[in-house]
Image (spheres, coloured by chain):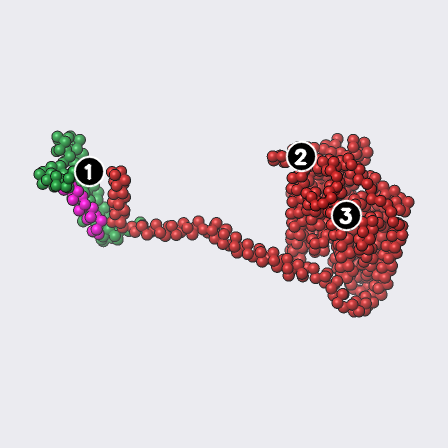
Chain colours: A red, B green
Amino acid sequence: MPKLLALIPLLPLLGFVSIGLFGRKAGKPAVSCVAVGLVVLSFVLSAAAFRGLADAPGGRIAVEYAEWLSVGDLKVPFGLVFDPLSGLMALVVTGIGALIHLYSVGYMAHEEGYARYFAYLNLFVFFMLTLVLGSSLPLLFVGWEGVGLCSYLLIGYYFETEVASAAGLKAFLANRVGDLGMTIGMMALFAAFGTLTISDILAQAGRLSPEAGFGVLTFATLMLFLGATGKSAQIPLYVWLPDAMAGPTPVSALIHAATMVTAGIFMICRLAPLFQLAPITLTVVAWVGGATALFAATIGLLQRDIKKVLAYSTVSQLGYMFLGLGAGGFAAGFFHLFTHAWFKALLFLGAGSIIMAMHHEQDLFRMGGLKNKLPVTFWTMAIATLCIIGFPGTSGFASKDEILYLAYLKSPALWAMGVAGACCTAFYMARLFTLAFLGEPRDAHAFEQAQESPRTMLLPLAALAAGALLAVFLGWPAAFGGSFRIEHFLEPALAFGRTNALQAPPHEGHPVLLAVISTALALGFAAFGYATYRNGLGAAEARAARFPGLHRLVLAKYYVDEALEATLYAFVRWLGNLMWKLFDVILIDGLGVNGPGVMTAIAGDFTALFQTGRVRNYALGMTLGVLALLFIFLT
Amino acid sequence: MTPVHSFWSEVLGGGLSGYILLALLLFVIGLATVLIRRSLLVQFMGVELMLNAANVALLAFARFRNGDVRATTFYLFIIAVAACEAAVGLALIVGLYRHRQTTDSDRADALRQ
């Protein structure tokens, strides 16, 4: 029975292969059935395995299928591990994945590349599940790269537009930088432990005590974290995620909000015992996360494109997750991943519903008053918005509050950054919501034609809204009389192999007071956002005019792209040009390819001098040759 | 090494070296003719001269080895082969002349291209 675990990732792969081969001929209904059906089946299997966890020895199901790599000391098996961490993640991937597949049936109904889209989407689910369930770092890395490939393919889904293909390329390149760190980190781990199987690494690491200074573990974990910043869009590698919104909206929901971009958080949770041994790395993680959470949230304040707002919001929320991990709250970080997956997917799908109703209008300033036109979208979006701004009692409140509390224990400055970010989040979400649904319609023509989306899109919205609301029961914070159940549940995975008990962070301070302060501030900013945009754009413009410099700076996203363009990209382009001219043109083309040809031509021209065609010359040559032979043999 | 004066005394005294020297002279003259002249007919004569230089050498060796039959046989063969070769060579020259209206070997250089 445990062998059936492989079916969880393999079913979506089957979908990819069959749709990829026969999808165009089979027609849209068949493609929809296969694509959605197989992911649903995969979800059912995951759920079954999840139920089986309780009876499994050690609380984990580990299956080894075959040996994969065997080079010298390096032995990597083909194995899958289903434990509370990967199980929960697999449920998120297949569950939310299935809902988004269903949503796509409606959203993509009139697209040309329907089969191509679903083939890629299924392939993505396959790679994501490989990443999640893989028992070794190389297998995780295969999934890691695979989801990157699918992300590239799906961002560039509208490849005929230059924006989309450039965005896909940017995502791919930014991820390459991170992946370099990831590979270096894996090599360092192999050098330190002599194995790349995760459970073996953790079992060995469990016997170590935390490093005081900078050692190989710190180096390895920092490198792995660099990989995470690429995949999970943190400073300094976050620039690709906002551009990735060029892809279809369900892709943004699935890949660039709920699952793929959280792979970095998942990877760190997977190796949690290792990261706990490297306090320097954890501090770096916390500060990078906190900085990203605040920085991206401020950019989100002024974006006009509804998807761009959500993209910066995702970057910011991922920052919170890293903040939680860095503060030592692996369960808290993962819990935020879990709740965020629901409400951010919901926000994106809601945005997709609005965009479709407005005939592919993404500009918030042209929306407005859609509340009565799109009632289901309105109510589900309202739930998601309340979750993300941390309205008391919602899942977002529970997870973000836990992270902020842990951040406070680490450093009050981190807490302040987190709260400031939360205030920005509340403001831009209130702004987005007000501009889209409330007030007067600003584009009368589009408003007249707007109508609610088909049922295949509304059903996922409702399901995600339910999930976003129910997720709170998994981890209601202890400070508010809950038990933060997810921490206990994930314990076997997060503390795998640990023999020396690490003392839990002391629960001190005033968690309730901190939560009250941050929530009150966030709600205040939400109200401020609502008040600013309630009567259209006038009030906001008046306020922006009072800080023209700051307004322009934030509107231009702090000129990060321009600065990178002027420095890093220019340098890389210069280097590339140099390499092109030096290595490609001169060395490879010149010496490598044309070199032998030119040499042959020169040699030919030279020897052609002897080919006079005159008998006398040949006779002379022959005579000289005979004389030379005589000279050689007779002396 | 044979002293120089004894070499010339042998040459003048009708020894083997004289015949060899004659053969060598004939051969070099023939070779020079082939290499220097451009007329195919004259070159052809040079070739014949070289052949006969070889014949002279062969007969001289036969004579000084007590009438060795093998050398004489070779000489007869060469005469026969040279006759055939002369026929074929002259035919080629005639053929060339019919095509090119020349017997200049330097103008028969079509193979260069």
Looking at the picture, how far across and down is residue A545, in whole percent? 79, 69
Q: Which mark, by number, is residue A326? A: 3
For mark 2, what is the residue?
A: A77
Task: Please give the range of residues in magenta.
Answer: B22-38
Q: Which three-letter amino acid code belongs to the residue tagged 3?
A: Gly
Q: Position of residue A175 (x, y in %)?
A: 67, 50
Q: Are the residues tagged 2 and 3 within 8 Å (C-beta)?
A: no
Numbered badge on residue B81 = 1
Q: CA distance from mark 2 to mark 1?
A: 82 Å
The prevailing secondary structure element of the residues shown in magenta is: helix
Do labels 2 and 1 touch, CB within 8 Å? Answer: no
Q: Can residue B51 be spotted in the picture?
A: yes
Residue at image point 75% right, 45% down: A279
- Badge nearest the viewer, 1 or 3: 3
Q: Is residue A42 visible?
A: no
Rate crowding at label 1 as few (under 14), some (14 to 19) or many (20 or more) other CA atoms within 10 Å. few
Q: Quadrant of residue A562?
A: bottom right
| Nearer the observer, A58 or B91 | A58
Estimate the spatial distance between the alpha carbons at disc 1 and disc 3, rounded to whole Å: 102 Å
**The quarter of the displayed image where residue A125 is located:** top right
Residues tagged by mark 2 and mark 3 found on one chain of the structure = yes
Q: Residue at x 15, y 34 (%)?
A: B61
Q: Chain of mark 3?
A: A
Number of disc labels: 3
Callouts 2 and 1 in the same chain: no
Q: Are marks 1 and 3 in contact (CB under 8 Å)?
A: no
Q: For the residues marked 2 and 3, what is the alpha-carbon distance in whole angstroms?
A: 31 Å
What subunit carries mark 1?
A: B
- Amino acid type at circle 1 is Val
Screen quadrant of the N terminus of chain A: top right
Q: Is residue B98 left or right of A47 when viewed as pictured? A: left
